[in-house]
Amino acid sequence: MAKQKMGKVAVLDKIGGKFEVKEYPVPKPGPGQMVIKQARCGICGTDIHMYHGHMPGIVYPIVLGHEFVGWIEELGEGVTQDYVGKPLKKGDLVIVPPGVTDYHDFFSVIAHTATTSTSTFAYGFSADADKVTHFDGGYGEYVFLHDKRTNVLKTELPPEIAALTEPFCVGVHAALRAKYKLGDTVVIQGTGAVGLFCQLAAKMAGAGRIINVGGPSKTRMDMAKKFGADVCINITEVKDAKERVKMVKAETRLGLGADVVVEASGFPPAIPEGLDMLRTSGTFCEVGHFTDVGPTTINPFFQLCNKNVDLQGVWGDDLEHFVRILPMIEQRAFPYEDLITHTVGLNELNKAILFPAQGYKLDGREVTKVMVDGSKY
């Protein structure tokens, strides 16, 4: 009898705790399931907030990581093709939308927000215990795609770029919610990965002029410029919010404000500032708060009702967003690899997860996107 394969995962023991690399038997996939060997997994801002306990309902210990891709290790019976019909075999690289749902409940059929479906399971968000598979998240050597509703998309992209698809999908979701019109002037608040992908999605969707308000470093602002921003305003150089609003309006038609503002920084004070940058009857799209980092104060009369604001909220991403954006990423129109500043092993997660507290630096270098290589431990 063949010896059962073993695999390593990095388990976070508690809020603000430690990642411990543990080894478990890798499950054998049954019908409709598959096992993939992790190729890359991005460290998401949501992972960092979950580390600090900012997401209600999360149970620890946990194996984090939802921005993962991997090579097919073993296919269960009946798994022959990806979602768009491409044939699958061992060794193929696949992108995995982390959230899976039945797509037939109220939120899918009536509310058209499958991302909030009550039947959703999401890889990288489930507690790790002996009664589960242990390989539920991307911070590991393998991922067991055990939910039979899981869909994958095959790609020829390099793994590190393929792993950027999930955060890019958040930008796609924002674009669909914001309903950009050709030639819109768009403000993007934030120069993290989500902010930059919201910016790229806006550009692809027809934005005529993009103003990025972000920071904290010149490096990040240079990255925003490289990825399509026409104007960049660094919050560390222009510290006064009212001055930033004035500068933004000066870059818009008749000085009235932006057609669309996308808040992707995740800092509560950015919300009222962004609303002030918006023109009357414009669209404000909130993308930066997937965890609870606290409230903010707005004036409903001046900032919402009196301006006839179209207010949109974005929660995560869905299979649709992956299907829409992957062919565009595969065109390689932008240097996506430039976003990846660091690649770490499982044994380096305790250091890597703390980069925001270290001035957004890791090993002395500025961070834009950190990737986890599951083969390094």
Image (cartoon, rainbow, N blue to C red):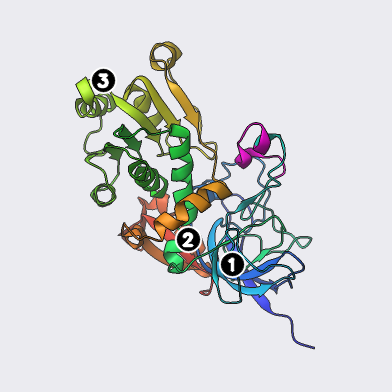
Going by the picture, which residue comes out furthest to the bottom? 1
Q: Quadrant of residue 230?
A: top left
Q: Residue 110 magenta-drawn? A: yes
Label 3: which secondary element: loop
Position of residue 351 measured from the top left corner of the image (x, y, whole percent): 46, 61
Mark 2, Cα crowd under 10 Å, few <14 / some 14-19 / many 20+, is many
Q: Which mark is residue 140?
A: 1
Residue 78: x percent and y percent?
73, 68
Q: Which residue is mark 3?
A: 256
Residue at 42% over, 35% down: 267
Q: Specify whether residue 225 is in view.
A: yes
Residue 77, percent across and down? 75, 70
**Residue 34 on the magenta segment:** no
Q: Earlier in the sequence, mark 1 or mark 3?
A: 1
The mark closer to the camera, 1 or 3, is: 3
- Give residue 193's mark: none
Residues at marks 2 and 3, CA–CA distance in whole angstroms = 39 Å
The type of residue carrying mark 3 is Leu
Q: Residue at x 45, y 60 (%)?
A: 352
- Residue 163's disc is 2
The tag earlier along the polypeptide, 2 or 3, is 2
Quadrant assignment for the N terminus: bottom right
Percent position of residue 55, x then y:
59, 42
Q: Quadrant of residue 209?
A: top left
Q: Which residues are magenta?
A: 108-119
Q: Indicate which disc, 1 or 2, sits on the residue closer to the N terminus.
A: 1
